[in-house]
Amino acid sequence: MPELPEVETIVCKLRAVLPGKQIAGLELHHTKPLQGAAESLPQQYVVAVSRRAKIIQFELGATPTAPPTAIILIHLKMTGQLIYQDDQQRIGGGHPTPDWVDQLPSKHTRITMTFADGARLFFNDQRLFGWWKIIAATDLPQAHAGLGPDVTDDTFTLPYFQLELAKKRLPIKVAIMDNRIVCGVGNIYACEALNVARISPFRPALSLTEAEVTALHQAMQQVIALGIELGGTTFDGKYVDIAGLAGQYQTVVRVYGREGQPCPNCGGLIKKEKLAGRGTYFCSECQI
DNA sequence: TGATATGTTATCTT
DNA sequence: CAAGATAACATATC
């Protein structure tokens, strides 16, 4: 489920509670999602919680303020959730399912992380696409190899974007969802950004004019920033009111999931077609 | 029953 | 070799 705004939201919430906590252990309910040495984790402290692309990072050290020596990398993929629970509160987020409110661990809980103070962090994932990787801090650059700049980062500059697009004949929507070009734009926000910029998802990337690339660059940053501000997107009517877990971007969504409805730019008909295997929503009038 | 799903990557086919 | 399309991962829901 999660796109970058949802991941960023989870990271912010966990950053408020995890740093300083000492890990007691990991309980593996399923072996597939975990790679790396889980036996090295007990006694380690969470020093920081960070993010790169859609990868959540728990930086671990021997004391609460030590430089991190190991990092847990977590990818939620389509259906992952991270839910933190102590005796006061339940926070976190990810794919909206009954596990948000049910007793945990549930049948979808793959990993439970326990802390010395009794708090627990549950990793739930219906489809088992998500993963945890435990690596040495020195291996972090290797783990990020091949990733382009984050859409939220200063390094995602307009000249860089122009240069990359000028090389590709790919449909523009496929290009902006390619992590080698730019990280953090998933299917929902790709559709949204192209609508804001009034560009057809099917246009070859290198066919965009300089003005169009500029508008798209800005639109991508704008829709991602709004997504983060609203705490991500929760496309599930049952859980939208659950404080601490649901996002609100779905209340301002422009085209995604709105086939047959009017375009917010021009009132034209929003259509849905398949592009590179993904549902693609766009205005048939103004996205040219 | 079949289509679809907010992600990424391997493997085909041109 | 490269671009582009398709399949694959595994499960749930409509």
Image: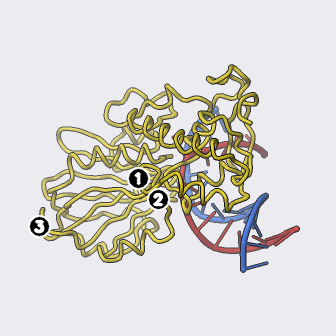
Chain colours: A yellow, B red, C blue
Task: Judge the density around disc 1: few (<14), some (14-19), many (≥20) Cα neighbours within 10 Å.
Answer: few
Amino acid at dot 2: Pro
Amino acid at dot 3: Thr
Query: What x and y, as percent, mark residue A150?
Result: 45, 55
| Label whose residue precedes the other's in the sequence (3 or 2) | 3
Q: Give the answer, above or below, for where A32 lies relative to A244.
A: below
Amino acid at dot 1: Asp
Residue beneath the point at 71% across and 40% down: A200
Residue beneath the point at 26% across and 64% down: A59
Query: Which residue is identified by label 2?
Result: A149
Query: What x and y, as percent, mark residue A180?
Result: 55, 63
Query: What x and y, as percent, mark residue A122?
Result: 33, 52
The numbered disc on residue A93 is none
| Label 1: chain letter | A
Q: Distance between the residues labelled 2 and 1?
A: 7 Å
The numbered disc on residue A63 is 3
Q: Distance between the residues labelled 3 and 1?
A: 30 Å
Q: Tell whether A15 sits left or right of B12.
A: left
Callout 2–callout 1 Cβ contact below 8 Å:
yes
Q: Is mark 2 on a helix, strand or loop?
A: loop
As rendered, which of A5 and A153 lies closer to the eye? A153
Q: How far apart are marks 3 and 2 (CA)?
A: 31 Å
| Label 2: chain letter | A
